């Protein structure tokens, strides 16, 4: 598995592309991560839109988010996003 | 059992439960090695209407290490895909299945094979058909023919994936009832008259993945060693099953999976996770790679069964009871292989890395007169030199733990008389009704459900 900083995470083309789809639908989260502006639309393949993407936060306090897509796992840290996700559950 | 339902977590996930792994120089094709990995324990032949099949969401793998580091150098990966031809019937088959392409078989299963060498993957084949389960004389009347159709030759390598008769035999009821071995229960702490052993896997089936490939495909330098003392003659073999890290139910009876493959089952030497590894470590053991097995060595050096035998059979194992040294013999046999100089004309040593692998010396030719007791029976082509389908691994390991192999490393030790006699069957023998084939895939035709109903 890859362990990345937040900046490194957004450089992961496919993972970022997958995130783009989600973030576009969730404006408040997009604002928090600033991801959409960095993603060229052409880099998002159709296959990536048809694959499920799972996000898992095992420890809220750590701010660490694990993204599962295809046979990859991308781990990044974004306490702000974790807090917004937590707020969304209330 | 060898590794059937041997750990808490995998016992709840039978399609990923690796039950036995075998590796041997093919007796009818001595230029090849056959490796068999079995999954799905204790299949009752009449277990319909949804008969047993491999998991479409499981990655099945056979691994070979040829440089002794406990890391796979050659792996074969198997992925399955199952179809439902007619979703509007409850039937597994809508008529007689006369060929594996029959449209009467409603749940055909196919697989792909990928070979990975030093991290480089190549797809060897896809859409390879499995045979159906053996339902009964009306549904699968010519089962041997169906199975034969499911042997796929790709290049020099043969593949088979499908149901087979269970070839591993053991008196399950006796072993798990405080090791009350029926032929010796008159000597047990709770004595009863001695009785013949009962095969707990009688008339049950498993699902088998088998490959038969040239020896040169598996050795370190691509050679076919002929000198048993040649280090390159020894390969290490194990099998695994993995699931993707994430799984989410969709509320419609299905699920989706994502993420890297996580190993949930592994198996090389028989009975290791079953009786050597303690309950609190079994699930973790299943997730480890062999090169990390050093963490478990204390359980080999002081096996729990060694302590139990003198207690459960009072006065029968006095020498074993007083033996307190670490079991270097078991470490050698099960974790490094046997170095040269211990057994005349034999070695299967892979170096100092402690790793659970079936170690096969491919320069030892198949025996013309095999002993089910393998090396203990004077047959260098048998367990623990690899493992053949008929080897009596329960008796061999029971006797080894009881002390018969201690003198290999400690000549001052005299084994108890009972150590050379103990077995779940007496004398050790393949139970009546257990059959094998003389050719690939060697495990017998699966028992059909009509003639072998659950009792």
Image (cartoon, rainbow, N blue to C red):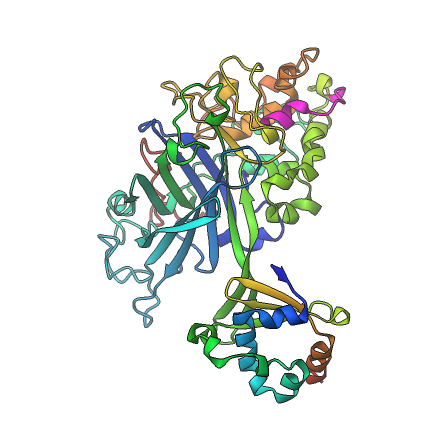
In this view, the residue in front, B184 or B356, is B356
In this view, the residue in front, A61 or B176, is A61
Can residue B53 be seen in this snapshot?
Answer: no
Answer left or right for B231 relative to B161: right
Going 51% across and 50% down the picture, which residue do you hit?
A: B241
Q: Is residue B173 magenta?
A: no
Task: Give the quadrant of residue B91.
Answer: bottom left
In this view, the residue in front, A57 or B400, is A57
Task: Give the quadrant of residue B366.
Answer: top left
User: Furthest residue to the bottom?
Assistant: A27
Residue A17's x, y, as percent?
A: 53, 76
Going 61% across and 61% down the picture, which residue do you hit?
A: A2
Going 39% across and 21% down the picture, which residue do you hit?
A: B365
For residue B162, above or below residue B260: above
For residue B403, above or below residue B264: above
In this view, the residue in front, B14 or A64, is A64
Task: Give the quadrant of residue B177.
Answer: top right
Residue B88's x, y, as percent?
A: 32, 72
**Which residues fall within the magenta stretch?**
B321-333
Q: Is residue B323 magenta?
A: yes
């Amino acid at each position: 598995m890859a362990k990345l900083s937040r900046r490194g995470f957004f450089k992961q083309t496919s993972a970022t592309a997958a995130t783009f789809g989600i973030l576009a639908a969730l404006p408040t989260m997009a604002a928090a991560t600033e991801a959409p502006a960095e993603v060229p639309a052409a880099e998002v393949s159709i296959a990536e839109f048809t694959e499920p993407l799972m996000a898992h936060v095992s420890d809220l306090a750590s701010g660490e988010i694990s993204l599962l897509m295809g046979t990859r796992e991308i781990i990044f840290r974004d306490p702000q996003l974790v807090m917004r996700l937590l707020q969304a559950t209330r | 059992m060898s590794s059937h339902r041997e750990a808490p977590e995998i016992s709840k996930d039978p399609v990923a439960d690796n039950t036995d792994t075998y590796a041997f120089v093919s007796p009818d094709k001595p230029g090849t090695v056959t490796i068999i990995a079995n999954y799905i324990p204790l299949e009752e032949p009449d277990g319909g209407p949804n008969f047993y099949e491999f998991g479409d969401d499981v990655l099945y793998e056979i691994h070979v290490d040829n440089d002794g580091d406990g890391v796979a150098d050659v792996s074969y990966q198997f992925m399955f895909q199952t179809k439902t031809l007619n979703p509007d019937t409850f039937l597994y088959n809508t008529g007689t299945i006369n060929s594996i392409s029959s449209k009467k078989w409603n749940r055909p299963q196919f697989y792909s094979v990928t070979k990975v060498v030093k991290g480089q993957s190549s797809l060897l084949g896809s859409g390879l058909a499995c045979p159906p389960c053996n339902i009964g004389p009306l549904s699968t009347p010519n089962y041997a023919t169906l199975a034969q159709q499911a042997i796929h030759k790709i290049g020099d390598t043969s593949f088979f994936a499908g149901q087979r008769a269970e070839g591993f035999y053991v008196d399950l009821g006796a072993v798990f009832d405080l090791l009350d071995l029926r032929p010796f229960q008159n000597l047990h702490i709770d004595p009863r008259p001695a009785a013949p052993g009962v095969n707990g896997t009688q008339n049950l089936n498993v699902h088998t993945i088998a490959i038969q490939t040239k020896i040169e495909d598996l050795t370190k330098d691509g050679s076919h060693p002929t000198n048993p003392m040649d280090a390159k003659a020894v390969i290490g073999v194990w099998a695994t099953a993995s699931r993707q890290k994430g799984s989410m139910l969709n509320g419609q009876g299905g699920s989706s999976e994502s993420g890297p493959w996580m190993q949930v089952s592994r198996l090389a030497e028989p009975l290791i996770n079953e009786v050597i590894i303690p309950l609190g470590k079994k699930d973790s053991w299943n997730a480890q790679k062999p090169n990390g097995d050093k963490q478990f060595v204390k359980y080999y050096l002081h096996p729990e069964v060694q302590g139990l035998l003198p207690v459960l059979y009072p006065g029968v194992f006095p020498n074993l009871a007083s033996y307190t040294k670490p079991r270097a013999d078991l470490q050698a046999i099960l974790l490094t292989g046997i170095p040269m100089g211990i057994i005349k004309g034999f070695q299967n040593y892979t170096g100092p890395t402690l790793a659970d692998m079936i170690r096969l010396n491919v320069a030892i030719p198949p025996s013309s007169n095999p002993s089910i007791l393998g090396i203990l029976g004077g047959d260098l082509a048998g367990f623990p030199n690899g493992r053949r389908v008929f080897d009596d691994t329960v008796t061999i390991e029971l006797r080894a733990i009881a002390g018969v192999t201690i003198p290999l490393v400690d000549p001052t030790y005299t084994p108890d008389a009972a150590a050379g006699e103990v077995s779940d069957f007496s004398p050790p023998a393949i139970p009546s009704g257990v059959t094998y084939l003389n050719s690939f895939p060697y495990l017998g035709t699966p028992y059909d459900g009509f003639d072998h109903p659950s009792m």
